[in-house]
Amino acid sequence: MRESIRFYLGNVRHEVSGFSPTRTVLDWLREDRRRTGTKEGCNEGDCGACTVLVVRLEGDTLVWRAVNACIQFLWMLDGAQLFTVEDLRSPDGALHPVQQAMVDLHGAQCGFCTPGFVMSMVAYCKTPGASMEEDAINTALAGNLCRCTGYAPIVRAMKQALMAPGDALDTQTEAIKTRLKALADGQTVEITGPEGRVTLPASAGALAAAYQADPQATLVAGATDVGLWVTKGLRDLGTVIFLGGIAELAAIEESDDALTLGAGVRYADAHAAMARLHPDLGELVRRIGGLQVRNAGTIGGNIANGSPIGDGPPALIALGAELTLRSMAGRRTMALEDYFLAYGKQDRQPGEF
């Protein structure tokens, strides 16, 4: 078992331990690393001013995701490489093509939202098959708000950036893969500090054991709701179990008669499969928050939390979805509709996930 998280900020490796379970990526960047390009706007995942890039190795592919740093916790970075706007310049000082396009086409007005827009735009440039169509660009940038209403030149800048031959980050692909492979040691992580404990199980079995040992722990997947408990509700989390490193919970399986989704599957990753299941379901998912929210929020977390503003469960209930719960005692399956017993009450026993 490891007692620290390990990740890269830009090209610098960090190993951190002993911090509060409520420490957000945004606060760590601004207060500990002085990366003030990442802005705090709403502090609830709505405005996109704090957008950063989190890169993970999935199989042999680097996946670049734009996320809201304000409601991502520091321990969620284990095994990843984090990029902020300060990392985009080339070694010779040249601006990133997205930054240059924003300058050329006057995409910045007051400038407060600009770093977040830039990071979302860079992420879109990294998306395989990124479309030049404005509807696709608008969807990619919908999680970023411009108070000056300068959207038109930003969209034009996005189109110019998409025509660029590449960027300095592309030359680092193999180096990033090598770094992330070295971080992937398959160990469960447990970080204990004066304000609580965070466990990052390496497998579903390790999760079941950890949750049985402490069924009062807070399970966290994407933190798109739990993050607001902290930033808006000022709540302490105490003991936390993070589900993000468990491969079994991230599986998507399509067959002729069913779509099976692991509880840790992000909405963004499930979007295409859910759209194939039912076109209206795909459109519903496209409208869940901004892309930064869908890049973090999970289908299982949305269900398990039982929030009255949860977007997914009504549609899944209408489609006859079933839910499987697991604990150290075994598994049980029920109709999703039967999981919700009353307002704020779900049929989940101690130790079940």
Image (cartoon, rainbow, N blue to C red):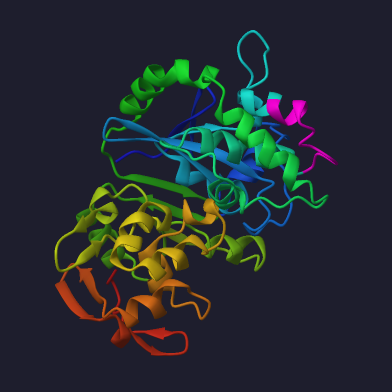
Q: Any magenta on residue 250?
A: no
Residue shown at the point (21%, 69%) measured from the top left: 326
Task: Give 108 or 113, whichever is nearer the viewer.
Answer: 108
Q: Which residue lies furthest to the front in this view?
A: 133
Where, by quadrant of the figure, is residue 303 drawn?
A: bottom left
Residue 217 visible in this rendered orientation of the protein: no
Count of numbered circles in the view: 0
Single out the residue that lies furthest toward the top.
92
Q: In this view, does 40 lie to the left or right of 135?
A: right
Judge whether 114 appears above or below 86 on screen.
Answer: below
The picture places residue 111, in percent across and down from the top left corner, at 81, 39
Q: In which quarter of the image is the N terminus?
A: top left
User: Which of the 4 quarters of the picture holds residue 179?
Assistant: top left
Examine the rendering and report whether any part of residue 89 can be seen: yes
Residue 52, given in percent of the width and then of the height, sits at 58, 39
**Between 192 and 87, which is closer to the camera in this rendering?**
87
In the rendered view, tell whether residue 345 sits above or below residue 107. Answer: below
Image location (x, y in percent) of residue 196:
49, 56
Q: In what quadrant of the picture does the C terminus appear? A: bottom left
Q: Report the magenta residues as a range.
A: 101-112
Closer to the camera in the image, 257 or 353: 257
Residue shown at 43% from the left, 69% from the top: 302
Percent x, y of residue 311:
47, 73
Which residue in the rendered view is the most extreme toward the right?
A: 110
Side of 275 where 296 appears, left or right: right
Q: In this view, does 296 lie to the left or right of 201?
A: right
Q: Is the magenta stretch mostly helix, strand or loop?
A: loop
